[in-house]
Amino acid sequence: MAYPQTAFSYTTFSSPSFISRRRDVVYSNTLQYQLEVLKSTGRYDAFKLAWHPSYNDKPDVWPVPNHLFWDSDVAKWIEGACYFLQREENAELDGAVKDLVAMIRSAQQPDGYLNIHFTVVEPEKRFTNLRDLHELYNAGHLIEAALAHSQCHNSDLLMEPILKYVDLLCKTFGPESEQKHGYPGHPEIELALLRLHEKTKNPKHLALAEYFINERGNPTGQDGRHYYDVEGEARGDREHERPMYYPKSRSYWYQQAHEPIVDQQTIEGHSVRAMYLLTAVSDLVRVDGGSGMKSESRTKALHRLWKNMTEKKMYLTGGIGSQKQWEGFGIDYFLPSGTDEGGCYAETCAAIGVMMLAERLLQIDLDGKYADIMELCFYNAVMTGMAINGKQFTYVNQLASTDTDLSRRAEWFTCACCPPNVTRLLGYIGGYLWSFKSDESDKSVVVDVHMYSSATLSIPLGDSVVKIEQKSNWPWEGKIEFSVSSPPEVSTTIRLRIPGWATTWQISPELPDFHVAKGYLTLTPEWLKANSSFQLNIPLTPRFISPHPYTNQNIVALARGPLVYCVEDFDNAWVDDHFKRLVLDPACVVSEKSISASEMKESYIGLTAHNAASLMMANEDLAPHMPLGSIAQKQHPSIEELHFIPYALRDNRGGKGHMRVGIRRKQ
Amino acid sequence: MAYPQTAFSYTTFSSPSFISRRRDVVYSNTLQYQLEVLKSTGRYDAFKLAWHPSYNDKPDVWPVPNHLFWDSDVAKWIEGACYFLQREENAELDGAVKDLVAMIRSAQQPDGYLNIHFTVVEPEKRFTNLRDLHELYNAGHLIEAALAHSQCHNSDLLMEPILKYVDLLCKTFGPESEQKHGYPGHPEIELALLRLHEKTKNPKHLALAEYFINERGNPTGQDGRHYYDVEGEARGDREHERPMYYPKSRSYWYQQAHEPIVDQQTIEGHSVRAMYLLTAVSDLVRVDGGSGMKSESRTKALHRLWKNMTEKKMYLTGGIGSQKQWEGFGIDYFLPSGTDEGGCYAETCAAIGVMMLAERLLQIDLDGKYADIMELCFYNAVMTGMAINGKQFTYVNQLASTDTDLSRRAEWFTCACCPPNVTRLLGYIGGYLWSFKSDESDKSVVVDVHMYSSATLSIPLGDSVVKIEQKSNWPWEGKIEFSVSSPPEVSTTIRLRIPGWATTWQISPELPDFHVAKGYLTLTPEWLKANSSFQLNIPLTPRFISPHPYTNQNIVALARGPLVYCVEDFDNAWVDDHFKRLVLDPACVVSEKSISASEMKESYIGLTAHNAASLMMANEDLAPHMPLGSIAQKQHPSIEELHFIPYALRDNRGGKGHMRVGIRRKQ
């Protein structure tokens, strides 16, 4: 069973591309920068288990101590660093990894327990608040770090203490009467345990993951009651005492724990948690081979929740989560562009989570709709999360700025989940480009190409290797050159994704006949033997897109290929209202231009709408009733040209921080 | 200083009109019906101070016991009954009032205290939770009941215990160190005390009202801290223990107590509380004569908050409050039509509160913009609150139904503020039609006519009487016949409101020259002497209106005169989706037709849009990106005619409960 975190090893980024340039920035800037931040904030040394002054701070989000995620910050950095170290040696990074691993080893308690907060600050409160306190979430990230470390260094130095800790968890949680019937408020350990099981084949690791997934939302799991009710009562919580992220008491949907996963009809709550959880559910379906009653109901739930999310709760950029209070999903079609319309969250980590889930679903069922969303998220909601310099990040990715929420990146966050998540994603991004199956017995290889870039996939098959190289300037240009090197005895099939947004495409040499099934074009072994080099061309032209009308977002946005564009004040200096009054007539001419600016470190295609823009003039005195015709749309003298830049590249050139993706559509 | 609750005595409803017919229903059905409900639910006997089984019920909205408002339910019914009894004797109603007054008298404690819950259920908790527990709110309604009772019966039987209770309150609350520096979580007593002071001239009554208003939101009012912090701590509240209506801890803006009123920049929180509070602030400005530093800052705050509310936080129907969680205002321009778009509350009581505030502001500054809103609220957000039969009511008045919130009235509510509020409003509605000033010394009378109907205003002036009669079929017809009977020595001026929505109007006999100042046309004593009968004609034609584009409600609605219309499934039987897919082209022909249906007890003007309606067809599979042109608008074969009924008259004829005011506008 393939995971992108392991499968990426078969991919090399041979020639420059958008992706390789982003990876280069992470390797040369981000990893070092984040290491410095880990050190300066106290995270780096935290596994030494000394007291840190910040442990006294009042939590920003009660009851969650600000430092509660430090274990995971360190773990995710180790994981990301190891992915890059697997490709290229680097003494500084390597030294830091060694150092951190040693500290983690030293922090382990005699019984295997391994957590900073619950060793240093509140040792008596171990496993007493699974709902809010991220103890098992941290454990999950430690497992993922150990997997990456072990894969990179072929060493058990980190895996050893982690396995010991997992043993303790396997003893602590489970269905037996002396075990706790709980599960993490923030899923993560489930997918980590399933990946761990892939490596260890230890049935206890699979069993614990499955237990956490099955038990979640059980209304009678602990002593005939909901586990979170029982643990809350044991803590002395009062009925109406609740964290800020709970709009009501017992808002367990925040944690996707309001009912068993297989019963959930709509996607709810904290969006990162939802994505991590469903990723693990997908993995469980794969482990089970997709058959049987359990797999069937899990698969139904996955499809139902995916459909609800992508059709009714996803932004134009692939971002998810409109509600700041619980960092998650609102009701169907509630997708305001920004704070002044009622919210927009679209957390970077959540979009990374969508990619994780989409990749798993693609492996269950090869359908371009998953790959379309995976690529949409990558090039927009995720890539906007890191500055061109690799040293500034976003947490929230609104589609329109306001005075209170400018379009700006930050150097770090108290809750710093997003920056190292981008790092580790780019570390194993090769695993998202394509997936493959090889069978040595009948000498066959099937490669499904999901995303285009410049990269080489080398698939070992017995003593030989099948190599597939793609070269392109994607996402700026739609021409992709393929070359396949396959020993004559190997039967190689390639399935190429034809994006859902593509209205046309060409392949040369021409195919005698072709069939696109669920978004993938199959190239047969016969054709490939005759055509070891070929070119796919998916013309990239600007197109206008809109959200569903039920969103009440009467807007249009520009897209080109997988990229969604935005307007920024840098290119449109007249703006003083975050483009709120701006009206766009989509029946306009849009031109494109390749732009090279030194600060962007990336030549990009800018778009310009000509004579399409006007400003709305509404007489507020007439409210609450605006008579028909009282709202004028005046051509502003200076906006003959309206300039667009990819959303992923916003806020890299200075400016006032005024930005908007979807522009009011001309009536 | 005039209050509509007293000034209405000068108005009689001589001939039939929309208003008189609504009043007749209240007199013949509603008062008796509500009396029965008071009896069957236990409210009627509650002042006997016996235990009622429902006192054991768990609160629907913690920490507010469900029966906490019973005092006010009884008080408001007494108040409403007395307004009607002032016009017409009725042995049954009169007997009930006598009975209730006797019970209230008997419920008073030796020290003057008078409250059901805090005498029967939690006597030890008197005045320990002003923030949440409506103790002073109930007191306010008792004062208003006593004023109505005293005015109707010329008796002190109710006033006597109430004055004793107010004495206790004056001792308990105030600036002295031994007094509590608190103020009610739900304003009401402030406006009641100001009306009481108008009658008693007791400076303590004015002082307590002013104290409550000034102290509100003081960050250092009690021992250098916010009063609500101090009383919460004294109760043993925990920091993160909070009522459902508090999205965060210390959401004191819910009670308009986050900062002093004069500093508040936007209208926030629970909308009924906000209206009752600002009404009292307006009254205080009037008491002070409108001059001086205090009045100036209060007047500025009133204008600022009124402007914010009407321009950015008011629905097409005059309804206010989009947020169910705190029954109040959302951010600027957040005005979804219904639950499936993120909420719509528009509580009946809140619209009654807008009318109260508008009437007060009109007396401070005669400006038609206040009267326009007052009339808008009355004919839409308020009148929709009671069924034609006078026995069913609304609490929430959404602009679009959904499956979870059908367009339906209910027979009663646990928190039953709205039904008796409509009753008492219609009791003194005569006080809203016009206001007047008379001066016996120079024999002058000035009458400002705010709303049109059929009614007679009789103004005593020394030994004579000035009589002004208006006759019209408003709001169905725009022709109003006036006749003025004024002794020759009296100089009578009339100012007639020309509604803001009127694009034209005529008066006959013609005026030689005229001047409309801030929405009022002045008829001089000279002209009136020559024209004791005249006719004003304001043509009523259907017009399309929209909310401000920043609301993201790309909708059009039909209005005619002061009435806003809606579509219902009763007239448009094809609907199966609450008219959500319906698209309307406002460039269509709209015809009107007088409709008499026996169940409506009111001939009304129905509107029909011809060949204007189509249904939107969107392919959800394409989400989150809908390509331009992917949304079709198909003419439904059966909707050549789209029928509209006034929103006030919705849900009187059966049907499925599908209803919508604002319809998606054709792109």
Image: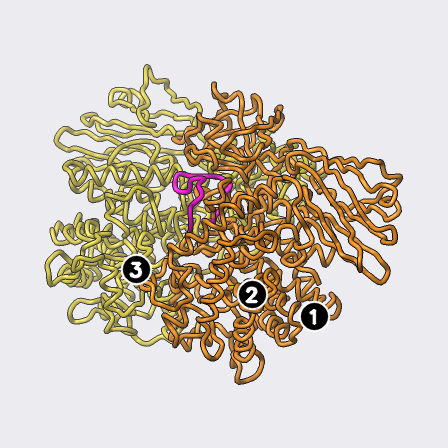
Chain colours: A orange, B yellow
Disc 3 target residue: B75
Q: Which residue is found at the position 26% from the left and 37% from the top? A: B458
Secondary structure type for disc 3: helix
The dot on residue A146 is: 2
Q: Which residue is found at the position 30% from the left and 41% from the top? A: B265
Q: Is residue A537 left or right of residue A183?
A: right
Q: Amino acid at mark 1?
A: Lys
Residue B306 on image: x %, y %: 32, 39
Picture layout, residue A599 above or below residue A184: above
Q: Nearer the viewer, residue A471 or B174?
A: A471
* A565 magenta-colored: no
Q: CA distance from mark 2 to mark 3?
A: 70 Å
Q: Is residue B476 visible?
A: no
What is the chain identity of the residue bearing mark 1? A
Q: Residue furthest top?
A: B512
Q: Quadrant of the C terminus of chain B?
A: top right
Q: Amino acid at mark 2?
A: Ala
Q: What secondary structure do most residues of the magenta stretch adopt? A: loop
Q: Amino acid at mark 3?
A: Ala
- Residue B512 falls in image quadrant: top left
Picture layout, residue B314 above or below residue B497: below
Disc 1 target residue: A294
Region in magenta: A395-412
Mark 2 neighbour class, 10 Å CA radius: few under 14, some 14 to 19, many 20 or more: many
Secondary structure type for disc 2: helix
